[in-house]
Image (tube, rainbow, N blue to C red):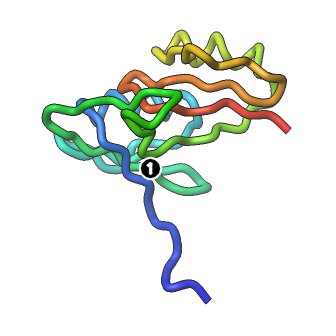
Amino acid sequence: MAIGELYDVVIDCPDPGALAEFYRQVVGGEITDSDSDWTTLSTPRGRVSFQRVDDYSPPRWPGQEHPQQIHLDVMVTNLDESEPLVLELGATLLEGSSKPVGFRVYADPAGHPFCLVTN
């Protein structure tokens, strides 16, 4: 028996509205709460919120000198078709990403690692 259930994933960033919009375009959903310090993206399968942090310092991948802190896996049907779409939105393919068939690592516009994955 669990104590509770997952309600939200909260990601620190310098601009909550912009990062929520990036992920809205990647995974769909709608912005359901937003101000200058907090923005929530709600989807049929859950929610992710973005919290403003002054003097934000982004994680770096790979390595743990600047830990990832959190990352999201985004299921897609075709990596080659999906990659240019996330890059156009402002994602960056991370150095060292070997681009295996079912898994590629990117950074969102605030520097958080996220992965596009396939079955």
Name the side, left or right, on which 114 lies relative to 8.
right
Along the line of sight, the residue nearer the viewer: 42 or 19: 19
Please report the residue visible at 14 percent of the width from the left and 36 percent of the height from the top: 54
Name the side, left or right, on which 83 lies relative to 63.
right
Mark 1 Cα shell of 10 Å, populated few (<14), some (14-19), many (≥20)? some
- State which quarter of the image contains the N terminus: bottom right
Q: Is residue 33 above or below residue 116?
A: below
- State which quarter of the image contains the C terminus: top right
Q: Quadrant of residue 50?
A: top left
Q: Is residue 7 above or below residue 49?
A: below
Q: Secondary structure at mark 1?
A: strand
Number of numbered discs: 1
User: Most extreme residue toward the bottom, as rendered?
Assistant: 1
Q: Quadrant of residue 59?
A: top left
Q: Quadrant of residue 39?
A: top left
Amino acid on which the number 1 mark rests in the picture: Val
Please report the residue visible at 27 percent of the width from the left and 45 percent of the height from the top: 51
Name the side, left or right, on which 1 lies relative to 57.
right
Please report the residue visible at 47 percent of the width from the left and 50 percent of the height from the top: 42
Q: Position of residue 83 (x, y in %)?
A: 66, 16
Q: Position of residue 22 (x, y in %)?
A: 45, 27
User: Most extreme residue toward the left, as rendered?
Assistant: 54
**Residue tagged 1:** 48
Please report the residue visible at 49 percent of the width from the left and 80 percent of the height from the top: 4
Q: Position of residue 87 (x, y in %)?
A: 55, 12
Along the line of sight, the residue nearer the viewer: 110 or 57: 57
